[in-house]
Image (cartoon, helix red, strand yellow):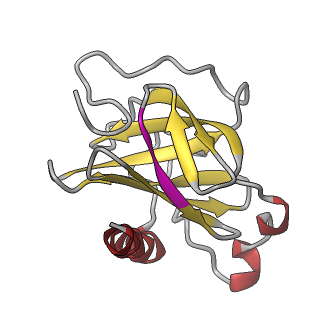
């Protein structure tokens, strides 16, 4: 189980490292109507915010299956023991570094990878069993809007309907 989790998370890390771009301009982080790459031009720029990041605690997860620009939300709490729980009742395990957090759900084949780019916490999601992918970002509670739960007719944060 641990080996599968490590392999899955390593795969997502590679995806984030090589293909993390904004899919559309409907994200709250969009500026001036053009899509910007999330990769930085130098290693120094990528870690500007890294020393002060603590992933543990409560966040709001904004997710868009299919990267449609319509985001569902749920709370997510990262515990110091490497586990997490969401407001929709899902649980799992995560690993993190100074600028990246990766998590996988216990009961689903869904994983997320979020990378810090200065003050933005953006990334991707994937449900390997159902072969769906999505876009995601994290905010601190109260930073944008409070969780509105999943969008009607759309999968929840774990990719289940």
Task: Examine the structure image and report whether residue 91 is included in the region drawn in magenta.
Answer: yes
Q: Looking at the picture, tell me which residue is in the foreground, 32 or 66.
A: 66
**Relative to 41, does residue 90 appear above or below in the rendering?**
above
Residue 91, percent from left and from top: 45, 41
Q: Main secondary structure of the magenta part?
A: strand
Indicate the position of residue 112 as horizontal and vertical percent values: 43, 54
Write down the region rendered in magenta: 90-94
Quarter of the rendering containing residue 52: bottom right
Question: Is residue 122 shown left or right of residue 160?
Answer: right
Q: Is residue 10 shown in magenta? A: no
Residue name at image x 66 percent, y 52 percent: 120
80 lies left or right of 132: right
x and y percentages locating residue 82 in the rendered image: 59, 57
Q: Residue furthest left?
A: 130
- Left or right of 14, for residue 48: right
Q: Which residue occupies 50% across, 17% down?
A: 148
- Relative to residue 159, is residue 4 depicted above or below? below
In the rendered picture of this protein, how many numbered marks are placed on residues? Answer: 0
Picture residue at 52% right of the left edge, 38% below the top = 85
Quadrant containing the N terminus in the rendered view = bottom left
Location of residue 96 in the rendering, given as x and y in whole percent from the top left corner:
61, 65
Which residue ends up furthest to the right in the rendered image?
A: 52
Locate the C terminus and report the quarter of the image it occupies: top left
Please tell me whether residue 91 is drawn above or below residue 7 in the rendered image.
above
Which sits in the foreground, 20 or 55?
55
Q: Is residue 28 visible?
A: no
């Amino acid at each position: 189980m641990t080996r599968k989790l490590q392999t899955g998370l390593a795969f997502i890390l590679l995806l984030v490292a090589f293909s993390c771009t904004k899919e559309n301009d409907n994200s709250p982080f969009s500026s001036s109507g053009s899509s910007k790459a999330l990769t930085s031009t130098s290693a120094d720029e990528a870690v500007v915010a890294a020393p002060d990041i603590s992933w543990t605690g409560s966040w709001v997860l904004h997710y868009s299956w299919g990267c449609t620009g319509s985001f569902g939300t749920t709370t997510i709490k990262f515990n110091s023991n490497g586990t997490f729980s969401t407001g929709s009742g899902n649980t799992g395990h995560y690993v993190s570094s100074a600028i990246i957090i990766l998590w996988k759900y216990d009961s689903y084949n869904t994983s997320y990878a979020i990378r810090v780019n200065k003050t933005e916490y953006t990334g991707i999601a994937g449900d390997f069993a159902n072969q769906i992918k999505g876009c995601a970002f994290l905010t601190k509670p109260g930073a944008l809007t409070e969780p509105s739960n999943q969008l009607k007719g759309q999968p929840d944060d774990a990719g289940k309907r």
